[in-house]
Amino acid sequence: MNRFSATYSNNFATPFFGEKATHLGNVLNVITDRKIAIPTADLTKVDHYTAQVVSYSDYYPFGMQMPGRHGSSADYRYGFGGHEKDDEVSGEGNHLAFGDYGYDTRIGRRWNVDPEAARGPQYSPYSFAFNNPILYVDEDGRWAVYVHYKMTKKALMKAGISKQTAKEIAHYASTFADNPSGGVRFLNQVLGVAVGVNPFALSKNEKKYGSYDLDSQNDGLVKSVSIHAMKAYWEDISDDEAVNRALHGGEFDQKDENGIVTGTIVIEGALNVIERYKVVNEKDLTEVDKKEIGVAMHTIQDADAHLGGKWAQGKKHTEHAKEMGSPKRHSLFRDVFGNKSKSKDDSKKAAETLKGGS
């Protein structure tokens, strides 16, 4: 299963980079928008065009590049897991700057202890992806999609909301709110089975739930990052301000990466959404209502998972964010074993508030 992503530039002289990667984010090859003319045999005209390839790689499971099956120009510095290579440390492709820690692709181990390792004592504190890089990916921390589903459904049912309504709102709080790629959704379906989540509950079902059109994966839009209680890669607000914005809302400037205001947006705030619906009886909730409640529950849970950290996707945005202060990153240990007690407690309070109006 492959995905294709692109990095644009406002500078005409700088090429467009298109990445072809696996569902785990491992970049297999990168092309630019520049085409190379291939002439006919007599060199009188152009026979056809071919893409300009700036990087290609095949990997062993833990990220080591296969001999004779990789190459990269100086214009591209990324690869396994979409992370930046630091070839000066251990040679070409052998060391990756995995956010806040270094990683050696030859031995599949971190250079320092995972700060959340105590939550998974059965694994080495230097291990990567639970020693199973085929199934797991270590990326920016967030509660997994199946975690949002289970947390929301359980809180709503405990508050006295019917199972059917709880399942529908939980779907909006997970698959709809995160809108994950097919590969990520599949991984969550596999992992969710172990904790009792029906894999079909995480499947996209447009006939039942409508279009999955929530723009929740745009790291440059205030409204999008607020869904996850985070801040855009270009913002210089504090972590607490980002969390407060997501939970309590207000009016905010939408700026571009150069700090130029492009408009004003209004964010209602997840807690305000819950408060608004407490006066609506459960049987009167429409699908639109359930969708708003589900997204609000997702935000409330993410306030503890992300703690207002910066969200930066793509190489250009990550570099920009680092210049202003590195984006907050968590580990895979936290995603799976992380202490979710506060998120569960906040979900319970939100569910009880909703039920109070029924």
Image: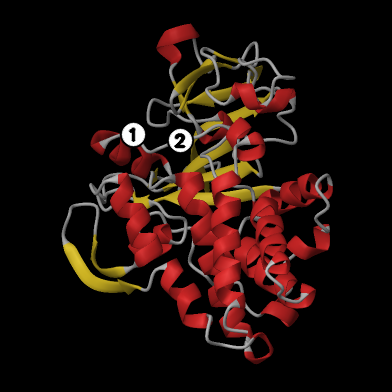
* Residue 314 at x, y percent in the picture: 43, 44
**What is the C-alpha distance between the residues marked 2 and 1?**
8 Å
**Is residue 295 or residue 133 the one in the foreground?**
295
Do the residues bearing badges 2 and 1 touch, measured as CB atoms within 8 Å?
A: yes
Residue at the image position 74 percent from the left and 27 percent from the top = 132
The answer, for residue 47, to whether it is visible in the render is: no
Secondary structure at numbered mark 2: loop
The answer, for residue 216, to whether it is visible in the render is: yes
**Is residue 41 or residue 293 the one in the foreground?**
293
Q: Is residue 354 above or below residue 344?
A: below
Residue 24's quadrant in the figure? top right
Residue at the image position 57 percent from the left and 26 percent from the top = 116
Q: Which residue is mark 1?
A: 326
Q: Is residue 290 above or below residue 326?
A: below
Count of numbered circles on the image: 2
Residue 130's quadrant in the figure? top right
Most distant residue in the front direction: 356
**How is the structure coloured here?**
secondary structure
* Residue 336 at x, y percent in the picture: 66, 38
Q: Which residue is mark 2?
A: 329
**Is residue 62 or residue 52 the one in the foreground?**
62
Residue at the image position 58 percent from the left and 53 percent from the top = 345
Inspect the image, locate mark 1, and give the three-letter code of the amino acid beneath it.
Ser
